[in-house]
Amino acid sequence: MLVRLLYASRTVPALNPEELHAILRRSQAENPAAGITGVLCYSDGIFLQVLEGGRSAVNRLYNRIVADPRHTDVELLRYEEIGERRFAGWSMGQVNMARLNPSLLLRYSATAALDPFSVSGEVSMALFEELVATASVMGQS
Ligand code: FAD
């Protein structure tokens, strides 16, 4: 039983680049053993993350992530049972926002800023798929 989970959150104000790297390192180290794949997007104080894997593994990880003091306002955007993964190539991919064409964000939202709190989960998922299609995700495993 595979599931895909999408959530958004706000980073605590004090989060620095080293802590962001620590989250990614930890994810890339832990996720393969748990059979988890996905992508983490960070921009201007907002996290958007998609997790895929077995239902129990994804639910366990999501509960740990919700309790993590490095972010707040964790909001579940989408949860679905799936037949196959879309992000199988990444133990935890990272979106390079610096290389992102602003027109890509404009296609899905009112401004060229990442704001998953103001759009539907479907729109955020479509953005993720586009990011993968345009090779904007780094850290292929
Ligand atoms: P421990 O390592 O035993 O830590 C105990 C507590 O301290 C936990 O609540 C933990 O969240 C917190 N903590 C750990 N390190 C720090 C730190 N440097 N500063 C402040 N608090 C800390 N983990 C994954 O395995 N896979 C993922 O894909 C993943 N994605 C994440 C995405 C985001 C946006 C965030 C914020 C965290 C993510 N994490 C991920 C980390 C996850 O939240 C847990 O910290 C990690 O899984 C370890 O959990 P643990 O219960 O073993 O905690």
Image (cartoon, grey):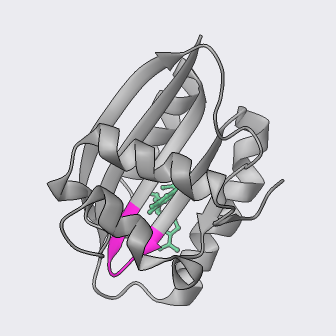
Q: Is residue 113 left or right of residue 96?
A: left
Q: Is 118 rendered above or below residue 136?
A: above
Residue 33, quarter of picture: top right
Q: Is residue 118 left or right of residue 7?
A: left
Residue 69 visible at all: no
Residue 92 found in image quarter: bottom right
Image: 90 above or below 100: above
Q: Position of residue 17 (x, y in %)?
A: 53, 88
Residue 6 placement, left or right of 38? left
Please report the residue visible at 36 percent of the width from the left and 49 percent of the height from the top.
124
- The count of marks equals 0
Give coordinates of residue 40: x percent, y percent: 53, 59
In this view, 16 is above or below 128: below
* Residue 58 seen in the figure: yes
The rendered magenta stretch, by its main secondary structure, is classed as strand
Residue 35 drawn at (x, y percent): 72, 32
Q: Residue at x 22, y 43 (%)?
A: 120
Tell me where residue 93 appears, x and y as whole percent: 66, 58
Magenta part of the chain: 42-47
Q: Is residue 131 magenta?
A: no
Q: Name the residue rendered at 63%, 34% in the picture.
A: 86
Between residue 138 and residue 22, name the one nearer to us.
138
Q: Quadrant of the N terminus?
A: top right
Residue 46 counted in the magenta span: yes
Residue that protrudes farthest toward the right in the picture: 141
